[in-house]
Structures are given as structure tokens and as C-alpha cells.
Image: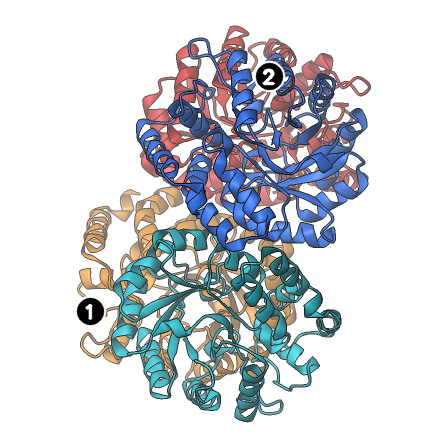
Chain colours: A red, B blue, C cyan, D orange
Amino acid sequence: MSAQFKGIISYPVTPFEKASGKVDLLAVRGLIDRLVARGSHGIAPLGSTGESTYLDDSEWDAVAEASIKQVNKRLPVIVGISDLTTRNAVRKAKFAEAAGADAVMVLPVSYWKLSDEEIFRHYATISDAVGVPIMVYNNPATSGVDMKPELIVRIVKEIENATMVKESSGDIQRMHTLMQLSDGGISLFNGSNPLALEAFAAGAIGWCTAAPNLIPDWPMALYETCAAGDMKRARDVFYAQLSILRFIVQGGLPTTIKAGLGLRGFEAGAPRSPLLPLGTAGIKSLETMLKAIDSRSLSEQ
Amino acid sequence: MSAQFKGIISYPVTPFEKASGKVDLLAVRGLIDRLVARGSHGIAPLGSTGESTYLDDSEWDAVAEASIKQVNKRLPVIVGISDLTTRNAVRKAKFAEAAGADAVMVLPVSYWKLSDEEIFRHYATISDAVGVPIMVYNNPATSGVDMKPELIVRIVKEIENATMVKESSGDIQRMHTLMQLSDGGISLFNGSNPLALEAFAAGAIGWCTAAPNLIPDWPMALYETCAAGDMKRARDVFYAQLSILRFIVQGGLPTTIKAGLGLRGFEAGAPRSPLLPLGTAGIKSLETMLKAIDSRSLSEQ
Amino acid sequence: MSAQFKGIISYPVTPFEKASGKVDLLAVRGLIDRLVARGSHGIAPLGSTGESTYLDDSEWDAVAEASIKQVNKRLPVIVGISDLTTRNAVRKAKFAEAAGADAVMVLPVSYWKLSDEEIFRHYATISDAVGVPIMVYNNPATSGVDMKPELIVRIVKEIENATMVKESSGDIQRMHTLMQLSDGGISLFNGSNPLALEAFAAGAIGWCTAAPNLIPDWPMALYETCAAGDMKRARDVFYAQLSILRFIVQGGLPTTIKAGLGLRGFEAGAPRSPLLPLGTAGIKSLETMLKAIDSRSLSEQ
Amino acid sequence: MSAQFKGIISYPVTPFEKASGKVDLLAVRGLIDRLVARGSHGIAPLGSTGESTYLDDSEWDAVAEASIKQVNKRLPVIVGISDLTTRNAVRKAKFAEAAGADAVMVLPVSYWKLSDEEIFRHYATISDAVGVPIMVYNNPATSGVDMKPELIVRIVKEIENATMVKESSGDIQRMHTLMQLSDGGISLFNGSNPLALEAFAAGAIGWCTAAPNLIPDWPMALYETCAAGDMKRARDVFYAQLSILRFIVQGGLPTTIKAGLGLRGFEAGAPRSPLLPLGTAGIKSLETMLKAIDSRSLSEQ
């Protein structure tokens, strides 16, 4: 079932209307179409980039529904589920499944630190409630929860729907351990943009990234050169886009991607307060980087 | 206005009904009465201990209202406001003020890291919306936001209602810097239980703590010996309760305090899932520690 | 035996001749006399401040001998022993004992990380070789070795000569644990200058510090107010000197203390290369701070 | 000049005589011959693995001389220089050059933290004293000095003999930054064994490693597959040896490599106290891993 996911999984941002700050569902659909049209292997709405934790429940439901409908089976859709309570995480997962999601990507988030057992039960409870595959997602920097490889492998082995793993800690040694503990049998996705080259070298089968919002050809080219096993060309393709990958991560993905979409002519509004829009200097830097990469030809890499 | 706060500010947990998991408002009121009766200088509902981030909006409102009403002006009440969006933090602060809160304690929480400017505006926006004093609250371990002393002092100097600071990082050097940057003029509260002795030594005027739920006399005795400037007796009083202070922090305050309340004969239910109730071994340890401290006489310290 | 140590243990720097960079034994003796004359409870040559790890063996021996001789039993002397090899640490400890040291302060240093067993044997081997008391010294920031409280307490319990502990990690919780694990029975010295107030509050009986080189009255006053249990006056005395304590630590003790001695009219030369002398801006800051504290009267604190 | 270095640079341990603990020069020479015979692109005596910081000056000189003589121009030799004082680092560098070293690998080590300026001058002073190329070596975990990429690139650009860089922090992002700041023009060597695959992917031209003491074919095969740009085969070759690479790093290189050499039938003695020989359980684990890898055929990877 999960075998359908691999390659470049693109995260849309969640556009807000400029004046009201409300979710802009028209723009949600427009952005989905852009991402599908320009090349992705899958779409992941309501991830970190999608500001999902900043939405109230009705907003969340509306974005999930609109996104899945708009993809309309052209690509597999995996919906992000991050909620402080298991109760509401289950509600969202069921909603996503009912709305036609092909899979859910579950990120436990914490206020109080979670024990391994608490994390395990969180996944087990969600798995019991839905039939779609679950991507186990580790992103300690944003979620406050750090799942060690041993726990992740236990979850994948013991929880039925947990069939994929996304590692966003940025620690390549975690990926090594995941590969070793599973004898290479794990479906591993990378979620750390500046680690994209090495994650593929280490055996990741996919890269979940917001970069396709701005430079769709380049992540795709990195995936393809790596899938072909061409280390030298992959290195060139990677370094060509690295500055942008770092920039969008360091400035916060919703903030920088929304600014970059603006530069690309797509109005996605501001990130939700307390997040502020990217400042003038940041916009200028990003513009310079986008111009630089646009002037390069992929075929010359 | 904020001068009314000092000494021991007690955090109630938020009790849930055992079967349904719903907020148990009767128990909320019962616990408030316990805390008031056994000695506190202030009550802080909906703090970290109160699982406020695990409540939905209507639950949050109900707890805020019931708590303030139950205190009924016997003590000053400061209501915790931690919300990912500024919009909802403002809503909660206004609700608390309308319900009669004497102050609000604002903890910025993050999914995407916040810049100093984003944090500053979060406080400024809340301050513009209410008239009650604001306690600036730093607790990086739970909130994912770490406010350096320089930022905290800027907030206190520039934002009108921001008149108090609660530091929970556990780093005594932060308190030194806060005192130095404000020439000792800051109203500093400590929120790190295992640092209680040294925070008072360094100049804190109060201690926000959940310990009074279980051992009300001991935090009070520490405050009083410190207020009297008696370093030797304060040390004895502190070491007598240190094991319990560490235990409740390490196991997570809602988890351990709810277990301890059960041992004290007050049923507060389980913490909300994914949080699990304290395990059998933990309950046994806590019981042993409570028996040990109950057998000690404060007058012998 | 170790009961003789308590209070303010002063670290002299090791002066070098300006032109040759050689150890300046005349200045070594002069500095010892200054420290003894202006008030200390003990002298600790060849500590971190004494650049002991930058001396070759013959230099080290000469400084140890000259220092002990110059103190001439006026105060107890504890000689610092930090060496990568156990073999040379033993040699130095025996030399110090033969030269008349009252105790040795042993800091394990590492290139390759040491296991607890390796650290334990290092202490045991030195203890077997000498008859004087050993101060177990933890200073992870400089030595690369971090001894947890559990290991320190084991060393003190099982190794005969190990009777004192100096904790320089700056983590007050380590001191709490040392006190708890030893039921308050440990002879605890603080080595973190900016933690001096709180370490005394937590139960330290002494403070090993280079500050007396520059401001001898103030560390002594802090010790005395703390020994008297006067928390309020101790706080005032502490904050009065805190900026200087932080400055000398942040700039590196040999670097800043040598610069400060120059400002005090005592020529101690430069620290040994690659260490550089304090720059002009740093000297100016230090001068301002020294003038400020000199203008304050201790009796007004 | 430095172009001669690339590929697998092997670190010999420094063998000690079992009874006396003295340097075993006969074994030094025997080990050099083993490493040369079994395939390396260069030899690096007196590195971290060679316990150089645990040797006294005369021992160090003897090992440097014997090693260079024994290689006898069959391969380029780069001698490790790590000393707390610039003075003695210069002395060693000059000694190595006079003895015929092709290059020196300079690792600043610290007791007191070094500023960027202090580190820069350390390199500049050594460069002024010798004519051979210098490899700038960053290894914060052992040396206590962490050189950021910006500083490293400044050293390489401004100091004449500094022509190569060895990064052992294990942080792949450092390598990215080094490549970016130098426009790919830096001669980058990796010193973190568990990062070997990804470092080559990111553009390292060599790998400095002690692994050839135990499994000479495997590091060589990784280098060759990476040099050929074959990402898939490189991945297989890497994972086949990863457990051993991690084991030798986690247990400390001198400790584990000496144990492994014993298992390989080459007696190198114990590491120098306080370092202890590998324990029985560790030896058993290592033996199992060596057997497992010996049973694999490289041609099947």
C-alpha cells in the first residue's frame, strides 16, 4: 500500500487571505495544481509547512478536504496529523481517511515530554482508528518530541499501519541506525532539506520537502540522479540548490515559502501571527538566490 | 498592581472525570479550596501543571471561570495563557480578565521557532487587549521558546502591562542577568522547583509551584525562611523537600501531581492522552517520599 | 586532615618573564605573598588559573616548590595536578607531597574520553602513591572530563585520601545531588565563580577562586556573610562583585587575571601562547569594573 | 604540493611494550609495514589514534622518526601535531619536517578555550616555521577546540602552508559550508568514520582513518566506489563496515584498534593509563564483527 510513496513529496503551504487572515481555499486549490503540474511524486498537505498546528479544527478540516479533492487522484496524498491530544489526532486521521487521503503522516507533538510508551500508544490508537498507511514522523526541533531509531523501528514492526518513516532530525547517523535495525527494510523518507543528498546516499527512498513550491525541477533532479546512483552529478545538483534549501529552513518554512511564492507570482498571504512575514532583507536575499538558480541550466549540471 | 503577587503561587492541576475524560468542574473547585485553605499567596490555574494546552477552548473557558469564581477574591488569581496563535492567546486573556482574573501569565509556545520580534509582538498584542498585569513566562523545555534575559527585560520595560517575570529555565545565571539588567528592579518569580532555594538567594520574590498540592507547608516554609534571610534554616527546609520537587518535575507535573493527589485522598483523574497516569513503581516511590516528609516536623528543621 | 580546608582558596596565576616567556619565580613568590597578606584561607598553586597544563615538567616542579616554600605554613597549600597520563600525575603528586603540600587537587584531563572506571583508577593510583588528602575536582569545560555526582561520591567513599570535592561545572543541581548522596557529609568546594552565592546557599564550605588576585576583600566578605547565614547581605555582596566574576571567567582566568594584576600594579607577564594577552577593549572594561568596585564600601553592603 | 594526498590515509596506533609500557619501536615499524603493504594512500603517524598527546617529547620524536624512516617514501607521510603550547607544536613540526615528513596535520588542543585569533596565530606561527604543507584539523570532541568553517577557510586562504582540511566533527553541514565557502576549491578530508559515505558524497577527497589497521580492504573499496561515483555500490560497501566503524570510534580508537590488532595477531600492547585495554565483552563483540566482515566477499557487494 505504502509502496506508492517514494521520490519527491511536496508540502503546500496553507494560504491565508490578506485582509481577513482566513484560510484562502481558492489559493489552496491553486497551489495544489501548481505542485501537481510542475512535478512531484506525492502531495502532503497540512504538514509543518502547512501551519497545521496554527489552524483551528474547522479550518484544518476544510484544508484537508479541499486539498484531497483538488489532487483528485492525480498523485497520492498524505495528510499531516500533529495534535497535542491523541483524541484530536484520531479525529483528524479519521477525517482525512474519510476525505480520501491515501495515507497520514503522524507527528507527535508535546508540551509535557512523552515517554516511549506514551508515543507508542499514540500511534497505536491512531492506527486502530484508520485503515490507511501511517508515516511515522520524527521532527524534534518543531514538535519537542524526539523518537530514537529504536522506538521508530519498534513502532513500524508492531503497529500494523505504520509502514513508512520520515526522519527530520537532520542527523544522518539516525538514518544509518534505522537502516541497520531494519536490515535495510524500512521505507525511509528524509525531511531535512540540507541533508537531501546524503539521505539519498544513505538509502532514503524519498524526500518530503517544501522546496518544489519555489524550485520544482531541482529536488526532482536530485532524486533522479540519486535514483540512478550517479554520485557526481547528484553532488552538483545538490550544491546548486543548497543555499535555497538552507534559507527556507533557517527562516521557517511557512515564512520563507510564502515569501518565495509571492516572488513567483503566487499570493499565499502571511503566516499566522505570532509568525511574521519575511522581512525586506530576507525577501531580497531569496530573490537573488531564485534568480541565480533560474539562470542555471539543469542539463549542464 | 502586580505588587500583590509574591510568595508561593500554587498551580492546581485540571481534574478530569475518570470514565469520560471530561473536565471535572466539581473537582476543580474542590482543589482550589484545598490550595486556598492550606496556604498559598496566589493561585495560578491553567498553567503547565493545569494541562491548559491539552484543553479545547470551551474546556479552557470553563476551567478559567470556575477557578476564578471559586477563589472568590480570597487570594489573587493569575491565569496561564499559552497558545500557538496570538489570536487565541488574546481571546483567552480577554476571557480571563472578564472572568475576574487579577493577572495573566503568558507563555509563548512554538511550533516554528519565534524570533525576538515575533515574541515581543505577541506580548504587545495581548497587552493592548487587556488591562490586567502580565507575567512574562519563560519555560523553554515545555514551550519550545527560549527568551533570553535581554528580551525579557525589553518586554518588561517597553510593554505596559508586563510587570512580572517567571523564569523556569532552571538556569540561575539567567536570574542573575535579569537582576543585573534591571538593577534589581524586576519582580522575579521562579518556576523551577529544584532551584527554589537558590532562586530566593538570588533575589526571586516568589515561587510558582505545583508542590502545594501535595506538601503545602514545605514550600511555604522555604519562602518564609528565605524572606527572613535565614540561609541555614532555608537550606535544611529545602533539602527536606528536594527529592519530592525533583520527582514531580522529572515525571511531568500533571502526571505526578495527579498521582500524588490520589495518594492524598483527592481524586483528580488521569492526565489527558497521550499522557499516561503514573505507573505503579512511580506511585510507590512517591508514596514513600510523602510518608518520609510527613514524618518530619517543620519546627525541627 | 582535610578539615583544615574551607573558605576562600586562592589561585595564583603563574607569572612569566616578559621577554623570555620563562617562569618568573620571583613574581611567583611575590604573588603568593600578596594573596597571603590580603586574606585567604588557603593557596592553590598550579590550578587552572596557574596554566599548569602549559608548563613543562621542570617548570611545573619549580613553581610547585617555590610556591609551597613561600607560603611557608602560613596557610594550607593545595597543589593542582592535571596530567593526561596517570604516570605523570603520580609523579607530580609525589613531588608536591615531598615539597610540603598539605593536599593535592586532582583534575583528570582527557584527549580520549575516559570511562568511570578509568577515572576511578586514576584517582586510586594517585591515592596509593601519596599520603596527603586529595580534592576530587570536576571541571568539564576545561578538562574534557565530566564526572557525575554518583562517580564523585563513589571516589570519595572508596578511595582513602579522597576527602574533598571541588565542583566547577556550574550546575547547582550537581551540588544538590552530591549533598544528597552523601547525606550532607561531603566537604564540598565550589569552583564556578558566578555560582558562588548559590553554592554557599546549597552547602559548599569553600570557594576556590582566582578573584582574590584582584579583589581580595569581596570573596572573603561573601564567604563570611554566608557562613553567618545572612542571605540578604550575602546577596548584596555577591551582586556587587558578579560582573567581575563573570568577566574573569568569560575571558579565561589566566588571561584576565594577568591583565587585572597589571592594572593592580603587579606584573605577571602574558599567558603562554597560543593564549594571547587581554586586548585593549577588555583591559578597559576590566579597569572600569575594578574602579567601580573599589569605590564601594563593603561595610555599606 | 598537497595534491599528493587523497584517498585513504591510515593512522597507525603507537604500540607499547607490554611489561614496561615503553614505546615499542620494533612494533611501530612492523605496523607501518602492514599498513603500507595492505593498501593505503598515505600514512599518518602520531594522530589521535597514535596517542600522541600521551607521549613525552622524546617518545614522540622517536615515533615520528621511526615511522617516517620505515615508510621510506613508499607513501606520503603526514605527521600529527597536537600540543597545548604553540612553542612545542612548532618544535614538533620542525622535527617532523627535518625527519622527512611530507606534511603535518595540526590539531589545536585547548585547556583554556581559544579565540579564533589565538587559533589563527597558532597555525600562522607553525606555518612560518616549516616548509611542508599543513592539514588544518578540526576535532572538537577530543581537542576541546571547535573551528567553524569560516575560520578554517580563513586559515586556508591566508596561511601559506595550510592547504588541506580534515573535518572530524561528524557534522555533514560543516562540510557543505566548507565546500560552499571555498567554491569547491578546498582539499577536504573526512575524519569521522561513521560519516565516511556521506563525506565522499559531499565532496571529500580523502578519509583519514584507523580502520585499515583491522579491515584494510573495506575503506579502500569505499573510496574507490565513491571515486567512481557509484552511489549504490558505495552504500553497500559502507553499510558492510559501518558496525565496525562505529565500534572503534565509540570505544576510543587506541583502545579498540589495539584490541583488534591483537585479534589480527599483531601485538600492540595496551593504551597508556588512565586508558584501559578493551574489556572482555568488547573484545568478543569486535571479534564477532571482524569474523562477519571477513566472511563477506567484497566482489559481491
* Left or right side of A216 for C142: left
Q: Nearer the viewer, residue C76 or A238?
A: C76
Q: Secondary structure at mark 1?
A: loop
Q: Residue at x 51, y 39 (%)?
A: B219
Chain letter of mark 1 equals: D
Is any part of residue C160 visible from this angle? yes
In the rendered structure, which amino acid carries the disc numbered 1? Glu
Q: Nearer the viewer, residue A153 or C183?
A: C183
Mark 1 closeness class: few <14, some 14–19, many ≥20 residues within 10 Å: some
Residue C92: x %, y % from top left: 36, 81
Q: Quadrant of the C terminus of chain D?
A: top left
Instruction: List the residue tagged with mark 2.
Output: B63
> Quarter of the image holding residue D21?
bottom left
Q: Residue furthest bottom?
A: C26
Disc 2 versus disc 1: distance between alpha carbons?
A: 72 Å
- The residue mark sitting in front, 2 or 1, is 2
Crowding near pointer 2: few (<14 within 10 Å), some, many (20+)? Answer: many
A152 or B136, nearer to the observer: B136
Tell me the residue that label 1 is attached to. D267
Q: Residue at x 43, y 73 (%)?
A: C5
The chain that hosts pointer 2 is B
List x then y, in percent, for residue B265.
40, 21
Residue A222 relative to residue A291: left or right = left
B160 w.r.t. A86: above or below:
below
Count of numbered circles on the image: 2
Mark identifier at residue A144:
none
Amino acid bearing label 2: Val
* Rendered location of residue C248, percent (x, y): 62, 69
Element type at mark 2: helix
Q: Position of residue A11 (x, y in %)?
A: 60, 25
